[in-house]
Image: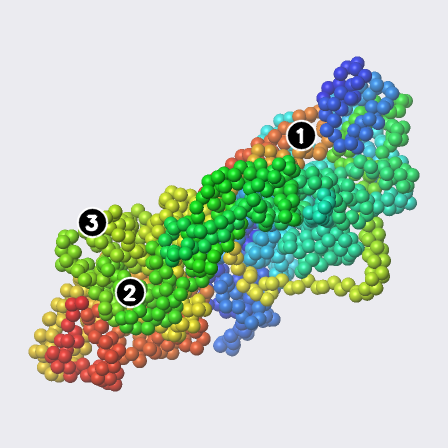
Amino acid sequence: MSLLHATWLPAIRTSSSSGQPALLVWADTWRVATPEGPGLTPALHPFTLSHDDLRAWLSERDLLPGGCIDATACLTLPSRTVKPRKSRNKKEEPAVEPPGWTGLPMQAGEPIPKQTEWWPWQVQGLAVEASAATEWLSRLPLSGTNPDLADELRWWSHLQRWALSLVARGRWIPQMELSKGEGYPHRARWVPLLNREEDRRRLEDLAASLPLVATCALPWREPLGRRSNRTTRLRPEAMRAANPVASCRPRSGRLRVATLLEDLVDAQLRMDFEPSTDGLDPLLTLWQEALGSDTGVIEIGDEEAERLATASHHWREGIAGGFAAARTCLELHTPPDGEDLWELRFGLQAEADPSLKLPAAAAWASGAEMLQLGEIQVDQPGEVLLEGLGRALTVFPPIERGLESATPDTMQLTPAEAFVLVRTAARQLRDAGVGVELPPSLSGGLASRLGLSIKAELPERSRGFTLGECLEWEWDLMIGGVTLTLRELERLSGKRSPLVRHKGAWIELRPNDLKNAERFCGAKPELSLDDALRLTGTEGELLMRMPVHRFDAGPRLQSVLEQYHQQKAPDPLPAPEGFSGQLRPYQERGLGWLAFLHRFDQGACLADDMGLGKTIQLLAFLQHLKAEQELKRPVLLVAPTSVLTNWRREAESFTPELAVIEHYGPRRPSTPVELKKALKDVDLVLTSYGLLQRDSELLETQDWQGVVIDEAQAIKNPGAKQSQAARDLARPGRSKSNRFRIALTGTPVENRVSELWALMDFLNPKVLGEEDFFRQRYRMPIERYGDMSSLRDLKGRVGPFILRRLKTDKTIISDLPEKVELSEWVGLSKEQKSLYSKTVEDTLDAIARAPRGQRHGQVLALLTRLKQICNHPALALSEGAVDDGFLGRSAKLQRLEEILDEVIEAGDRALLFTQFAEWGHLLQAWMQQRWKSEVPFLHGGTRKSERQAMVDRFQEDPRGPQLFLLSLKAGGVGLNLTRASHVFHIDRWWNPAVENQATDRAYRIGQTNRVMVHKFITSGSVEEKIDRMIREKSRLAEDVIGSGEDWLGSLGGDQLRNLVALEDT
Amino acid sequence: MTLNNGNTNGITAIGDDGLGQQPWWVEQWMELINGYRFKKRLERAWGYAREGHVTSIRFEGRRVHARVQGTDEAPYKVKLWLDVLNDEDWGYVLEALTQKARWSAQLLAGIMPSDIERAFAASGKRLFPFKLQEVRSECSCPDKANPCKHISAVYFLMGDRFSEDPFVLFQLRGRNRTRLLEDLAEHRRKALAERAAAAKDEKKASTPHEATPMPPHAAVQDPALWWRYNRSLDGDLVVITPTMEGDTGLDAAGELPLAEDPRFVEARSTFLNNLKAHGQASAQKAMLQAMAAGS
């Protein structure tokens, strides 16, 4: 797979170049390459796509930028040293001296070697001129990861978004840029204004997070020259002179990012600027025309240029300063007790980290030397301070008074001046690039607003299980960290001075404060547990328009709140009585969590990673209810057809006390009366999504105790019929009692914003509100723009109802064995079933009649054919191609698809083993079609060199294939494939040692992940019986393991029939 | 800006109309001209200036060179200059300027301190000419009177030039902006270094200051930084909205500080209007582009 990158090409000014900056778009891909080193000029990057391939690749994805040209640039990239392989052909003498260093450029995501070198590489790509680049960058996704796009493209898209915001807010000013020397004309430029506090912070953020590949280009001249309209190739000496082998060391900084931003903003404003020059004098005419021209070049005399430059700089200086590492900072201090003059202290503050501050005295004392602000060095601190004070006094004139001495460090302000500073000037000063620090009680945040301090506790008899119940509570008004009574507030408001002192703290009263407080006091509100959960859940929540500054919960309420907000996990529950099996510690915690939310009547979504045992936890929960005598009515569990068998099997083995039936198949009850009869004494009813939809009216007639949906992503589309049916079922009519709701899924549901609404609508409809509201408030901001604050808020809201643990979590990994074996029980499709039965019937008779000598071979052929049918009818029928209905014909394939979806989504890698090469080919074709990506297949016919390439690619390519098919025999030994964390045994082999050997490809020394081993077993079929034999280690199994397949031939008629006959399950 | 014919208050009429908003040093300059006795000549000079007879004004070093198209075919050459302060005088001025942080702060912010003359008083000299006679001038015209109407026309336009750049006055006195700010910084540094040294001696703290070398970039330790970017979009950039009326950079910057060409009185406002119209159109376009992002 290729990965797209973007690097800025700074303007090179030569006699032949236009001197315009451009964006280089290039892509690298993994391939086998020989190490290279710089010779005369930098070596060619061996992994980049050629110009033509890149164009095709971009067009295919609708990403081809408008107006781009083929280009070659020289990028400095981290590189790994690789010694050249010795040439086998000894006769061939190297024509040139071998380079002093050889190696390969590294690719994103590649493991970092111990020693990294930085070398320049010639990279082929497309150069996009600035204005086209801005349009192209605007179209890139702002959030999420895209397998085709490198991470730095997201940085670019964020930078461009900022540029758009600056243009939209009009934060720019035209400037005149003087020539910096020969071949560099005077230019008219549009320059962004970064004086606003938010923009300054953004510059620091983007500079600190700059992925260096974005700016790693060296000026590079292509080896093509132009002479009298003919393109000529430069001679090597000329090339060497034009492009010395040099690498740029990693650097970053606000100036580089500011320059990029300037280029983007300039390009955007330059477009379509062609107003009439009527009424302009000659100088402004020239300037205006140059501002609208492609290059900005302005043909003007040096003296006129200088005049224009001075004027335009003055124009700009009044509002924006330069980009220094530190800025002047003013600190306001409240008056000491009994006095009323405020103190304003001068100082310096680091731009990158405003908490790094030094008083002015230190700046004065450092004289001409550098000043150290934490890790940041400030050149000429006195000058920085004075320059900032100069800007400060244009905004806030009282400062003039404080600067009468040579080295001022503090001054006094009257209360009126202090108020102006707090209210308006502080913001203006920050916009002018001067830091202002106000006392915390006045700093303008939420804490400085009038709000509440609350104390609450659960009522004596309450267990804290109902959300609507009222709490015992008391409250005080609070502002700036101090509490006050309504009477006090009235008194302070009467003072007419906006800044007042109360209990030792200075606070700012606003016009509406008294009114809000009076309304609140008059309303005598009650506080419910629901309110308490909301107020303590996310910051900035209001109670009757009043912010809550402090919430003291009594000990009993506190423990409920903590558990609810998952600050403290609910107490784990041990495996209930009657549960035959063991729960791992994290599963006990999961069980405790399910029981906890159940007590609150809240729907729960258990979203544990695949392989952590969601099924077991849910069964344990049902058994827990049963053991507590709380399971009084049947529970309905909806799952994809492909896992119904699995559910049934797991329930049989873990919770034998639960009476389980399937509502499935043509013989299922079809009237309410029949259904009711069928449900007598039943605890758990399994049904499919298809039937949920088809039989929804019938199912609705029953009084369910709870509804569980497995593979809950099935209801992700809120408009789909099955989602509606699930939702209707979760909300019983008036005549019926409440139902608990549980959803199970292995996908990272909390990250799929679009699917969350439907899920929560099933679980707890009130949490996310109506769909329209949800779309406006959360979905658009998060999906389109990656808005973190909305996402945080959303996660805060749904967090209590979703439990997701990954097998990589530290607390989980210690609970898990290094190798987790999972049995995937699957059924048979209708076609498989009839083909299977027919084959058994036909062949058994034939075998019985066959002469003894041929029986052995015929039995083996039968078993092989049956295993093929369990995989897919197409395999048994020797069909060579994959058609549209391919998936539907095999239950095993359907289940495999579901699991692989999760594997791929999680970014994991998997090995898939089969013993049938034909099945491997069919599967390969189908999987490549299904996931639109390459799936290598290593089998007996694969050439040795190809084999190594497949393995290398899987192990080393950072964006290599996620799925790797292997035939059990060819791939079972001698390969090291430790990048896989999943192993699938699609069909069973008689000998577990062979399976284990294959599993060990992934599970070896060097493997840091837990390995999940999925073994597919078709229930009722020969596969199940093989599995049972292996597991029970029966005498038969001993024979199997001991003597290969020879024993099969000697099976008696009944024994053979038992082994192969399809059991109705 | 019109001049009321025959009205002796004609010059102040200019002031009321356009120059009232001017910085104080420009007003002071205009007052200087206003103090001139021959009003009729001034009126003619103003007419000259307004009709664009002054074809160029250049500040070359300490002198002003101008060309004024008179009745003759070839334009007359006008030269203006002030008495230059010598290095010693400047030494006194700079010394005085470092005494108040405000003076440095204002000069750095491009503001002419209103009490700047107090710093010059230290040298016994002045920044502003006290009388028009202190402004030396020459004109190549046959008119014997000084100032002639050509010189007077240049006077008028110089006021505008002063508002463009107050440091022009310093330049006429012998120090251009860059030089002045550099010299001032140098002086300040010296003064600060002396104070710092004195303070150190007092404390007897004799730890020598060692410049810490720049640490290597983090990517040297962690080459994955070459590609890594895992931040999410700044919350404030999620929704891109236009600014409030009157809150753009152009609004804050105000009038372009470029002297008006009297032949094109509307030029600056037309230019600004063009920019503002373009700003609005671009803002609209940027918002649409932002809304379409990621879709």
The x, y position of residue A67, in whole percent, is 50, 45
Q: What residue type is labelled 2?
A: Glu
Residue named by callout 1: B268
Answer with left or right where residue A601 lies relative to residue A476.
left
Q: What element carries label 2?
A: loop
Q: Where is residue A998 in the image (x, y as percent from the top left)?
A: 34, 76
Q: Where does the image place residue A500, in percent across and percent down from the top left? A: 64, 42
Q: Tell me which chain the residue with mark 2 is part of.
A: A
Q: Disc 1 marks which amino acid?
A: Arg
Between the C-alphas of marks 3 and 1, the distance is: 77 Å
Dot 3 falls on a residue whose secondary structure is helix
Image location of residue A384, percent across then percent down: 73, 50
Residues at circles 3 and 2 in contact by the CB criterion of under 8 Å: no
Q: How far apart are marks 3 and 2 (CA)?
A: 31 Å
Q: Do the residues labelled 3 and 1 touch (CB within 8 Å)?
A: no
Q: Residue at x 55, y 61 (%)?
A: B225
Against B25, residue A1021 (above or below) is: below
Q: Residue beneath label 2, please?
A: A628
Q: Using the image as rendered, state which of residue A833 and residue A811 is in the foreground.
A: A811
| Residue B210 badge | none
Could you tell whether A909 is left or right of A98 in the image?
left
